[in-house]
Image (tube, rainbow, N blue to C red):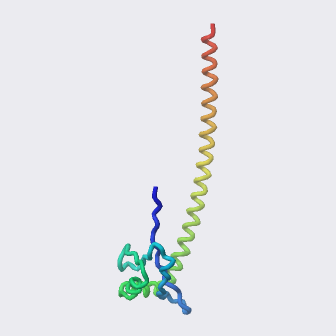
Amino acid sequence: MDLIVESDIYVPSMSDTGEYIDKIPSFANLKNGLRCPCGTRKDKTYDCAAYFTTHIKTQTHKKWLNDMNTNKKNYYTENVQLKETINNQKFIIARLEKDINVKIKTIDYLTQQLVCRETVNNEVSNLLDFD
């Protein structure tokens, strides 16, 4: 099984006034390139700062950044809801793992009981064959 390494996803920076702004990250640390979630070119990976600089000047990217600034409160609300969903899912998973562990122990116990009965039955049948 091969490990697949994906490119990093671009996240705009926050200005002193609380607005999202474009800040080109250092590509020296981005070994696998950078993808932008703006939708201009889906699944396009940028391998150097020059190409990414050209990308952030596109109208689609600028519109996306403007939409991010317009919908900041909605993104915050959605983030809070997603965190709550994740916590609920963790609780459900923990409960299911506990149920599975109990059932595994039950299966192990019943398997052991079955093996013991088979052993006793084999011994009894061997005694009957005794002359």
70 w.r.t. 4: above or below: below
Q: Nearer the viewer, residue 52 or 58?
A: 52
Image quadrant for the C terminus?
top right
Query: Residue sitting at 59 percent across and 40 percent down?
Result: 107
Q: Nearer the viewer, residue 99 or 42?
A: 42
Is 59 on the left-hand or right-hand side of 72?
Answer: left
Camera-side residue: 14 or 2? 2
Q: Nearer the viewer, residue 41 or 71?
A: 41
Q: Residue furthest bottom?
A: 17
Where residue 61 sits in the image (x, y, percent)? 39, 84
As drawn, 130 above or below 116: above
In the rendered image, which quarter is residue 38 located in? Answer: bottom left
User: In this rendering, is residue 105 above or below 23?
Assistant: above
For image coordinates 61% across by 30% down, the residue present is: 115
Estimate the x, y position of residue 113 in percent, counting from the top left. Answer: 63, 32
The residue furthest top is 131
- The residue sitting at 39% across, 83% down in the picture is 51
Q: Position of residue 39 (x, y in %)?
A: 38, 78
Question: Image check: 98 left or right of 75?
Answer: right
The residue depicted at 41 percent of the width and 86 percent of the height is: 53
Total marks shown come to 0
- Residue 67 picture location, percent across and down: 43, 85
Give the residue at the far front of this rendering: 28
